[in-house]
Amino acid sequence: QVQLVESGGGLVQPGGSLRLSCVASGGIFSRMEMGWYRQPPGKERELVATISSGGLTNYADSVWGRFTISRDNAKNTVYLQMSSVKPEDTAVYYCNAQATPVVERTYVYWGQGTQVTVSS
């Protein structure tokens, strides 16, 4: 029902900036909680940031103050603005959506991911 497509990944130098985008199709975007997760090489997937349908944000300690999550409901898009990036930010970044069409029923969706490599 819901498909997520990430874009914006690539190679960036330490201290640089990068903006990831995720476009959602299907479902009612404005009612979804959106998030970004990442999976570094050889490690498990971890939460980066989330933004609720009401605009409340939550960040992992490792990215607080450096990354900003935002959404544009008119474009069905969620963004992750990455600033002051570090080599340890290198990972595959995944877009996540949670939809609750009915009470007590939640569906979780994932994009295919986009590679972010921080290296000089």
Image (cartoon, rainbow, N blue to C red):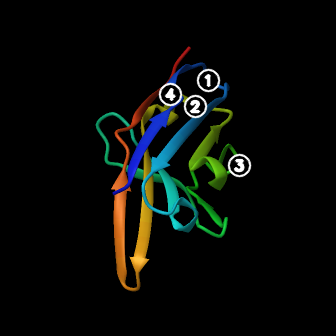
Residue denoted by label 3: 65
Which of the image's four quarters has the N terminus? bottom left
Q: Give me the C-alpha separation between circle 2 and circle 1.
A: 5 Å
Residue with the most extreme left position: 42
Q: Do the numbered discs 2 and 1 sit on residues whose CB atoms are within 8 Å?
A: yes
Q: Nearer the viewer, mark 1 or mark 4?
A: 4
Instruction: Give the crowd class for mark 3: few <14, some 14-19, many >=20 residues within 10 Å.
Output: few
Instruction: Give me the C-alpha separation between circle 3 and circle 1.
Output: 16 Å
- Between marks 4 and 3, how big is the CA–CA gap? 20 Å
Q: Which mark's residue is nearer the viewer, 2 or 4? A: 4
Residue type at the position of mark 4: Gly
Give the class, few, some or many, for how many residues have Cα within 10 Å of label 2's Cα (few <14, many ≥20). some
Residue 51 in the figure: left or right of residue 116: right
Residue appearing at x 56%, y 14% in the figure? 120
Question: Disc 2 designates what residue?
Answer: 86
Residue tagged by mark 4?
A: 9
Earlier sequence position, callout 2 versus callout 3 = 3
Task: Label 1, secondary structure: give it.
Answer: loop
Residue at 34% across, 39% down: 112
